[in-house]
Amino acid sequence: MTVIKWNVRAGAYYDSVVLMQLQRGLLGLPGVADAGVVMATPANRDLLAANNLLPEAVTANPDDLLIVVKAESDASAEAAIGQVDELLARRKSSSVSQDFRPRSLSGAVKQLPEANWVLISVPGRYAAGVAREALELGKHVFLYSDNVSLEDEIALKKFAREKGLLVMGPDCGTAIINGIGLGFANRVRRGNIGVVGASGTGTQAVTAHIHELGGGISHAIGTGGRDLKSEVGAITAHQALDVLARDDQTKVIALISKPPSPNVATQLISAAQGTGKPVVIYFIGYPAPARKIGNLRFAISLSEAAELAVKIGDLRLETTKKSPISSLYLRGLFSGGTLAFEAMVGLQASLSPIYSNGPITPNQNLKDPLKSEAHSIIDLGDEFFMVGRLHPMIDNDLRIRRMKQEAADPEVGMILFDVVLGEGSHIDPAGELVPVIKEIREQRLVTSDLEFVAIVIGTSDDPQNLQSQVSVLEDAGVKVFRSTTEAMEYVSLRFSSKKKYEFTPVNLEQLKQSLAAINVGLESFYDSLTSQGAQAVHVEWKPPASGNEKMATLLAKMRK
Amino acid sequence: MDIDTANQTATERLMSARPILKGIATARDVIPGMKDNLYLHAGPPIEWARMSGPLRGAIIGAMLFEGAAASEAEATSMVERGEVEFDSCHHHGTVGPMAGVTSASMKVYVVENAEHGNKSFSNLNEGYGKVLRYGAFSDDVLKKLRWMNDVLGTALADALAASNGIDMRALIAEALHMGDEGHNRNKAGSLLYLKLLAPLIAKTMRDSAAMSEVLQFIGDNALSVLNPVMAACKAMTDAAHGVDGSTIVTTMARNGTDFGIRVSGLGEKQWFTAPAEIPVGLFFSGFSQADANPDIGDSAITETAGIGGFAMATAPAIVTFVGGTPKDAINATLEMYEITAGESKFFTMPSLDFRGTPTGIDIRKVVELGITPRINTGIAHKNAGIGQVGAGLIRAPLSIFEQALLAYAEKYGL
């Protein structure tokens, strides 16, 4: 026969480590069968209920400390609850006369004015408020807390961007700034690889592997998992790329994320191209457009991302003399459906918006296959075009007419097409296409250059003779590739915008200073900072007005 | 309206006030609104029925001193017939330690704020043992009071009249560098006070036996300077009162029953009160926590002005009050920075690299952080006339800051 007793303490906030120690202390008392000590959040209540430690009569709010004891008798249960204060105090007795622990962020700033970073791990519903205060005080934020609303995240990041500050998070597990790990981070050597990570464990895996391979990390900047969603627009990732691009210590950048929104991916890739440094990109679960595009390398796993980053440390960047044609559009006119689809995969990340009659995602669907829009990849062998007509691999007529149609559009800068040789195909496709290309060139009214790029599939034994087909095309000024992959890299580079995103730059010098930080929330993060030799102040944080909603609301009004 | 700006104004006024001890005068001649049947007391206003033992004893003693009543019984029945009026010292620019009872014939210190022109007043300190401020009214208590009024009061009055006044801000600043925090410890300040007075007294007093008595009395009492210090703090905090929109506390005071505060941006006589708690502290031998009266006295005006418990870091000698080590004393002061709007420009602490003391309690910060002001205090016996039984620490009750916040919201339409 056991009894359950409980005690609710309104507005008494303790971090969970303390509560667990208290729980362990209670379990060691005579007659106690089980004990639970938690902040009474819904999740914690569920946990207690699962352990048969939540009698129905218990009423407690999320800000309340809930102590539940299951014991052999009323007396043992009462006695155990009576010990709570002593057990809490016992923890402190060893730390009498410790350094003063401020309760407010502003108090902490006075104590450690050189702190440029604030680590926040308070319960989610308070986290945005603390983060905003940190930004107002001019500090970068490492926001470990989760359950921060998307609206709050967007507002915080926009505010931070205006002030040239970083908000790493919410739900950011990992960062390494100037050799000091924030949150969960591995001890890795300093080096020349900068990491931008929208995934905490992803960043850990990559940085640890880089270390194992003999490389090192300059800075690893976390962004939080939602940064690469279109609503947030990768604000932090863009800032991080920009600051790492300016950092002399950083020679290579690795960009790690779970699948980003397509438009965000495009913008990030163009920002990565704009860094002028080798960038290894791994968008987990997002098809790599190519193995490499100019300064970009696309990895297919976390460990490969690390390997590539270490390997290309001293890569000399290829430079093209031609000025890019980023303001114009690409039109791809394919006879082979699979080649068209592979071109879409390769280009969707770097060309935006892009449409096709063989789209990868529904929003890429070209409304009218007869009319191209923006960047378009057309599969002319699609059955839509095949009614009463021979396949374009046999009959070039449709493609010739479409080529002229596209060339008449002054916004078109490049026409891409495939030439598939072999048995059954037209006997001289190059011979039919080249005169048209020449005619287009002569007749084009607009001054802008129009490039032609061809992917030729075939062998030297084919009836059309591969070599002669290629030279006829090349003589006509067509850039010829033997695979889609090579062609895609060329096309991506030609259209690369290296767009500069305008925002207040993050102060690089602050990243280079010895890290000094203020920790609000989990005490273990403070311990970890100090054990790494960083200067830190821990804020003895409690919910505003000890959780008194009315007072907290009033105070919020008075702050405006 | 910008609250931060209003608070800066209030705190700046508090800090820049320059209290000068100008002289000694009879209460009825100088205290605004003073009259023969009016008895001022410490803390927020309170009616006789709710007064604690020490306060009642002090009022009876003052009535005997005034000659208004011939006995305790007569005094009590006069009070009960409503022939006597009471009011808070604070409504009359006055402060007094413990019971703080001040009546018309008593000699009082006159302090003038040279910066803003306001005046403040405080009675003379009686020293230790059985004294009126702890509710004692026996014949020897009254005899000492008469000597203080006639001999000590006159000597001080003549001495101060022969001076240009004593700059209390400078005196406090110096004492803080000598181990005083200005509330529980006034040893250094009292000696500085004696040093300043001695030549003046020697110049003005003819009777050398009386002079010796006066100098001995001032020198023996390590609290001699407490009353002028309190009057100085009152002159400073009054200067900070009435700044529109400010949430800075301008009074903290206890009457032995209630703890009360006033706020700069709220009314002149608008008090927020809660039951005074019993201080926790160290007791003189023979006494224990069970003998302690609930918190009493206007001396929390020192904390309101940024010294006392707020300047604990500079008073290592009395760290046993806060836990035992100098670091605990420093932590006590660091904690008070969390709830204050500014740092004193004049009162600095060597142990904190001459940082200014935490000044200007902001009710918003108190409520937000749940940190209440620390007050160093003497502890009175709960029965009238026994006197001081110990000294210790008290914290202002949180609920009065919450009340003040609600009243502020109402007044300013939040």
Image: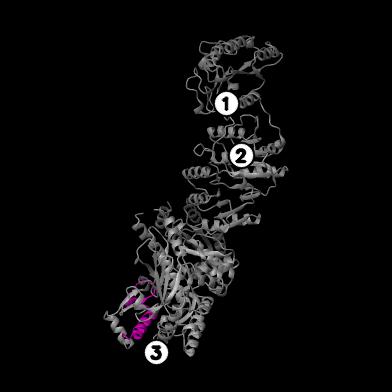
Secondary structure under badge 1? loop
Instruction: Give the image quarter of residue A308.
Output: top right
Please say whether residue B101 is visible from this viewpoint.
no
Please give the label number shown on residue A442: none
Q: Are marks 3 and 1 on the same chain?
A: no
In the image, residue A39 sits, relative to residue B50, either above or below, namely above
- Classed neighbour count for the residue bearing mark 3: other residues with Cα under 10 Å, few (<14), some (14–19), many (≥20): few
- To which residue does mark 2 refer? A256
Counting from the top left corner in percent of width and height, residue B343 is at 51, 62
- To which residue does mark 3 refer? B139
In the image, what residue type sits under mark 1?
Ser
In the image, what residue type sits under mark 3?
Asp
Counting from the top left corner in percent of width and height, residue B394 is at 47, 71
Counting from the top left corner in percent of width and height, residue B263 is at 39, 63
Mark 3 vs mark 2: give the one in front: 3
Part of the protein shown in magenta = B40-68
Does residue A57 appear to the left or right of A537 in the view shown?
Answer: left
Counting from the top left corner in percent of width and height, residue A98 is at 59, 65
In the image, what residue type sits under mark 2?
Ile
Q: Are marks 3 and 2 on the same chain?
A: no
